[in-house]
Amino acid sequence: MPCRTAILISGSGTNLQSFIDKVGDGTLDLDLCLVFSNKPGAFGLERARKAGIPTACIEHGDFDDRESFDRAVAAVIDEARPDLIVLAGFMRILSPWFVQYYEGRIVNIHPALLPKYPGLNTHQRVLDAGDEWHGSTVHFVTEELDGGPRILAGRLRVDPAETADELQHRVQTVEHQIYPQAAGLVGSGRVEFVNGETWIDGEVAEKPIVETFD
């Protein structure tokens, strides 16, 4: 049985579309059982509907605090019975309660070669530092922002003459390849979260799998 997967979004859903496409062409063995958004106007919801994926939306502004919103979200997610939760442009910092409740079952992607450059504005920071490599990293979600154990990273060489926007566009292309791939590894059981660490093929992975792109 394919791994039941819920995808959480807040915007246009370009990463979501990469999952939809790869499930559609048979290269990704996941059962996309829910797309959830905290914004009713998110175009990603329309992408999901066109693909026949159930959708749900709860606006965070209707709640007094982060945890009460997260508990309402979890109630909706649990109805879909997912084994894996994918954060794909979900622009909310998760409460400790939510992270603990779904421990080991949430993955995220960050536009940097973690542990370098957690946080925002990663593309400009890479250019300012004169780094040779940049990319994105898929990791399990823990309470440490962008600090969970890493699964898979995609890297490319930085052109010192390019702008942050140009670099961002190239990195997004990498993300659309590695995020479904990483989720598929978790869904198949080859990658697991065990005692706060990533295990790959039954062994502790001190470093993520790294793939290089042009």
Image (tube, rainbow, N blue to C red):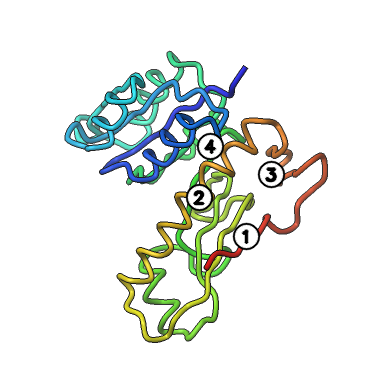
Mark 3 packing: few (<14 Cα in 10 Å), some, or many (20+)?
Answer: some
Q: Secondary structure at mark 3?
A: loop
- Mark 2 or mark 1, which is nearer the start of the sequence? 2
- Spatial CA distance of label 2 from label 3 is 25 Å
Contact between marks 3 and 1 (CB within 8 A): the answer is no
Query: Which is in the foreground here, disc 1 or disc 4?
Result: 1
Q: Is residue 115 above or below residue 199?
A: below
Residue type, mark 4 in image: Ile
Mark 4 packing: few (<14 Cα in 10 Å), some, or many (20+)?
Answer: many
Question: Which residue sits furthest top?
Answer: 79
- Mark 2 or mark 4, which is nearer the start of the sequence? 4
Numbered circle sitting on residue 196:
3
Mark 1 packing: few (<14 Cα in 10 Å), some, or many (20+)?
Answer: few
- Mark 3 or mark 4, which is nearer the start of the sequence? 4
Question: Which residue sits furthest front?
Answer: 25
**In the image, what residue occupies the spot 20% across and 35% down?**
61
- Spatial CA distance of label 4 from label 3 is 12 Å
Query: Which is in the foreground here, disc 4 or disc 3?
Result: 4
Query: What percent of the width, then of the height, locates residue 180?
Result: 52, 41
Numbered circle sitting on residue 106:
4
Residue topped by disc 1: 211
Contact between marks 1 and 2 (CB within 8 A): the answer is yes
Query: What percent of the width, then of the height, locates residue 45?
Result: 26, 30
Query: Which is in the foreground here, disc 4 or disc 2?
Result: 2
The residue lying toward the viewer, choosing from 111 and 175, is 175
- Spatial CA distance of label 1 from label 4 is 22 Å
Residue topped by disc 2: 177
Residue type, mark 2 in image: Gln
Question: Which residue sits furthest left?
Answer: 41
